[in-house]
Structure formats: C-alpha cells, structure tokens
Image (cartoon, rainbow, N blue to C red):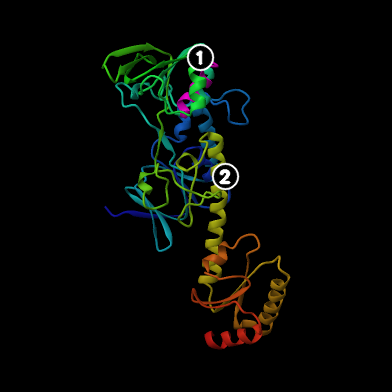
Amino acid sequence: MEKKTEQYDVVVVGGGPAGMTAALYAGRARLKTLLIEKSLIGGMATYTSEIENYPGFVEPIGGIELMNIFDKQFRRFGVDVKLTDVRGVSIECSQKVVSTFRTDYVAKAVILSTGNKPRLTGAKNEEKFLNDKGISFCATCDAARNEGKRIMVIGSGDAAIEEGMFLTKFASEVFVSVIHNEGTMDANKVAQEKALANPKMKFLWNTVVDSFEGDETLKQVVLKNVKTGQLQPVDVDTCFLFIGYVPNTKIFEGFVDMTNRGYIKTNEDMETSKEGVFAVGDCRDKTLRQVATAVGDGAVAGFMAEKYVEEVNYIQKEIFEAEGLIMAFVYNASEPLDREYLARIEQLQRERKDKFQLRRIDVYKSDRIACRLSYTKSPSLLCIKNGQVLHDCTDLNGMEQKIDEIIKKYS
C-alpha cells in the first residue's frame, strides 16, 4: 500500500495539555496545524479525579472535565486531529516528516508532546484498578479526596516519602511499602528522618506488591516479603505508586538529544537539538511536571513554532525563490553605523533601479533568519541568486564600488 503525503505548517505529536496548548497557539496564528494522538486526548491528566492546583477554578475540577475544555478550545481554531500512532519523525530535504502507518505528514515545524507514563509494579490485577479505580500517581491531585482514609504508598525515593508525608495531612494512615531492609530508603536523609518520626506513616520493609484486590474499586493491596515470600494483605482505599516515570520518547532515540533517562533536552524556548523541532510537557527534561507547567511549555512552543514558520516562509519566498539578484543586508538596528550603511544601500538600490532587490534582515532582536543564510557577522551584505549565497561581504568600506562589482559579476 502506497503511503499518502499531507502538508502542514505545524504537526503536534501528542494530545496532552502541553500538546493541546501548542496546537491552540499554532492554530490561532492561522497556521495549518495537525495534532496526532494515539489514544486519549488529555493524556495523563485524565487519570486524575480532581485537580485543585490549576489556576482559574475555585472548586476542584476533574481531569477528564478539564481536558474536555482544552479539547473544545483548541479545535475552535481549525486544528486537524488524527487519532493514530506515530511511528517516527525524520528530516528529509530540510522538511520534517511525521510518519504514521498510512500517511507521512510533512511539516515546517514539529512539536513533540508525547508525555510520560508512571512506572507500574507489574503486580496481578494492576490494570483493573487504573483510571480512577484506586491506583493513583499524584498525591497533590488526589490527596483531598482521601480525607480520613487508609492509603498505601509504593516506593521509598524522594517523591514517595515526601508525597507520603503530604498525604498524612489528609489520610488516617499511610502505609509505605519499601523493598529495602528496615531503615533503608532511597530518599534524602532529611525526608527520611521526618517520615520515620511521623506517627501516621507505617513502614512495611522488605516488601513488594504481589496483587491488587477489590471489586469495582481497590480494597486491598497484597504485599510479598522479598526475603520470606510471606504474603501480607493490607486493606486500603487508595494506593499511590511512586516508583518513577518512563518518558514516551523511545521512537525519538537518535533523532533529538536526550538525557540518560530518556527525557528530551530543550532550551527555554522549547527548541530541541534539531532545528524546527520543539518538545513540551512531561517528555521534556524539566523539574516540575504538572498541568500548569505543561500549558506554559505548550504556549512557548506554539509561539516559537509560529516564528519559525514565518522565518522559513520569508526566506523561501522572498530570498530563495525570488528572481534576479538579491542583496540581503544583515544589520543591527540599534547600531548607528549599521543604520548609516542601510541608508546608503537603500540609496544605491534606488540609483541602480532594477539591478538588484534589497532584503533587510535586522538582528537586533533575533539573528535566526540571518543564521539560516550562514552570515558571519553584522553588518554584512550577502549576494544571493537562484537560492545560493554567492558572496558575503563583511568589509563595507567602499561599499558602492563593491556592489557595482557584484552586479557586474552576477547579473
């Protein structure tokens, strides 16, 4: 079966809060935008029954309800949505290609928003109690609904112990399953000391989860002693898993730079190691992974993708596809001498009339366009014809004579 090819300005891979925000910004900027999600619009946020820390809502709001609002909002701006699995992203002839089973989506900019997923225990019946049925991954999100209840925490790292202490403000008891010997945890020493002194926290050493039990919702976690093999049932209302997260970035290995844990490296503009490819949300290397921070990432990436597409379109249309001789003057508008050179070049263009077209490229705020023309410094004058940079003049003394020589040579 021959693959179809479709063209877009921006393709967003992943439909969580970061991806939807990025798509909203791109769509609102009148860019032809596609969002691809392989399963559920809203991502991990839909697993949370109540979100209390997203600004704008006085009362808690369900994760699914909030993500439905996001969904309706970004679709208002004409964003296309495809529910399919992305098999890879590549760059071919300076174009980004997002590949699915049936279609290659060719884009000028790509935003990676594939999120991450909590590391599961692999115990029996685990899948049955996901999706708000007793297994949770976010204490900040779900603590309040466990007022006066019995909770179990799996793990002993910083997240597990610190979130466990937070949960003691709400729960009647917090059981902590730790795989290590008594007194040994992976958390920092300060957190360990506070946790051990907390009367609500009860540690179950040398244990792992053997199974999750219940009917419609979780009722019991059965622990297994790793030394004796003995099973220990513990009645609980909710079990929080804090044994780490796994970023959904495997298909991007070798394409963009990542940390040794598989999170995508970006700068503050959400730019990855590949030009025109951005990363946002929980798949990005960052400190805090919440809906609020995901939205911030998406806003920045959507804005930067708009600027990138504008630059690509300008260079392609006004420089590489323009007919005749192009003089691109790279200058800094804040420099008096650069402004003087610009005035002289503009006068020369008027005098030489149709001999060349002038393109003004100001690097005062950003040199991104100039960098795509491989300029060396400002001020400089680039001679371009048929999409090729033929000459880069950085010494502008005697500029009039040099321009006449360029005209004579390349016209």
Whether residue 30 appears in this view of the structure is no
For the residue marked with disc 1, what is the amino acid?
A: Ala
For the residue marked with disc 2, what is the amino acid?
A: Ala
In percent of width and height, residue 90 lies at 38, 55
**On screen, 242 above or below 36?**
above
CA distance for labels 2 and 1: 36 Å
In percent of width and height, residue 165 lies at 51, 20
- Using residue 167 as the reference point, say whether residue 352 is left or right of it: right
- Using residue 331 as the reference point, say whether residue 113 is left or right of it: left
The label number, if any, that marks residue 171 in the structure image: 1
Please give the range of residues in magenta. 158-171
- Using residue 44 as the reference point, say whether residue 226 is left or right of it: left
Q: Main secondary structure of the magenta part?
A: helix
State the image quarter where residue 395 is shown: bottom right
In percent of width and height, residue 71 lies at 51, 36
Q: Secondary structure at mark 2?
A: helix
**On screen, 381 above or below 147?**
below
Whether residue 277 appears in this view of the structure is yes
Q: Is residue 167 magenta?
A: yes
State the image quarter where residue 392 is shown: bottom right
Number of marks drawn: 2
Category of crowding for the residue at label 1, using alpha-carbon neighbours closer than 10 angstroms: few (below 14), some (14–19), many (at least 20): many
Looking at the rendered image, the quarter that the C terminus falls into is bottom right
Mark closest to the chain's N terminus, 2 or 1 = 1
Q: Which residue is mark 2?
A: 299
- Using residue 17 as the reference point, say whether residue 121 is left or right of it: left
In percent of width and height, residue 58 lies at 63, 25
Residue found 34% across the figure and 47% down from its top: 87
